[in-house]
Amino acid sequence: MKDINNSKMIEQLEKLFSRLNKDLFEDKLPLPIITIQSRGKRKGVLGWFTTYKAWENGIGGRYEINIVAEHLDRPYLEIAGTMLHEMCHLYNEVNKIQDCSRGGTYHNQKFKDTAEKHMLIVEHSSKYGFAHTKPNEDFEKLFSKYYQYDFCFRKTKEKLSGGNSTKAKSYKHFCECCGNIARTTKIIKLICGECNKPMMIEE
């Protein structure tokens, strides 16, 4: 996946965090460092959250939320679901709620409670507890309303494997009010999710 622009992806993930923080956490979560890293030997892992401030700049520390690089070609809703899962861990950490044991792998009832309060469906397994989550219908509705034009992670299979592909013509839509940008492969009418105003097409 070396051809994908990591800085653009992280910019989009930071924007996603900001919106979820505002919509679901009353904008009270501290901004973490958001990274994209390989899962390494962690099979089946989609993301992780550090329960300590892994980043230090001399003024104060920041937590880390990582989205696993190998799974960035999933549908955008699933990526948002992973971000929301890790944000639930962040919420519990800053509120001094211990939600995991067994070296951080087993998700307990307290994690389940937080996740279900924040639009996630939670499933249980004997090995990992309540670790398996996915967005519920309310989150899907929220996502489709606000986030559908913001993401740019997916690449064709040809590009992911290093092959050749023909680049489709792209049209840039922008909001004159807030500056939000969206790209499409054809000219369509778009409404800005932030301002509820029609987006313009850049000539």
Image (tube, rainbow, N blue to C red):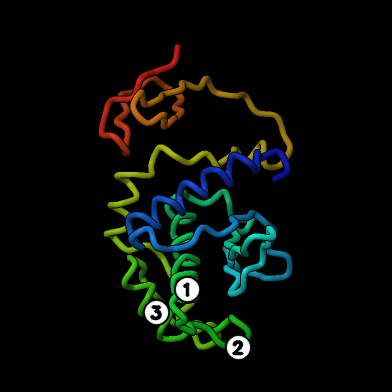
Q: Which residue is mark 1?
A: 94
**C-alpha separation, residue under disc 3 versus residue under disc 2:** 16 Å
Question: Which residue is at the front of the view, 161 or 4?
Answer: 4
Disc 3 and disc 1: Cα gap in Å?
17 Å
Q: Which is closer to the viewer, label 3 or label 1?
A: 1
Find residue 9 and report its horizontal and vertical position in percent: 58, 44
Q: Position of residue 11 (x, y in %)?
A: 55, 43
Compared with residue 43, is residue 129 higher up or lower down, i.e. above or below?
Answer: below
Residue 126, x across and y down, in percent: 51, 88
Q: Indicate whether 118 appears above or below 34.
A: below
Tell me what residue is drawn at x 73 percent, y 70 percent: 41
Mark 1 to mark 2: distance in Å?
20 Å
Q: Callout 1: 10 Å neighbours few (<14), some, many (20+)? A: few
The amino acid at mark 2 is Arg
Give the number of callouts.
3
Q: Secondary structure at mark 3?
A: helix
Residue 112 bears which disc, if any?
Answer: 3
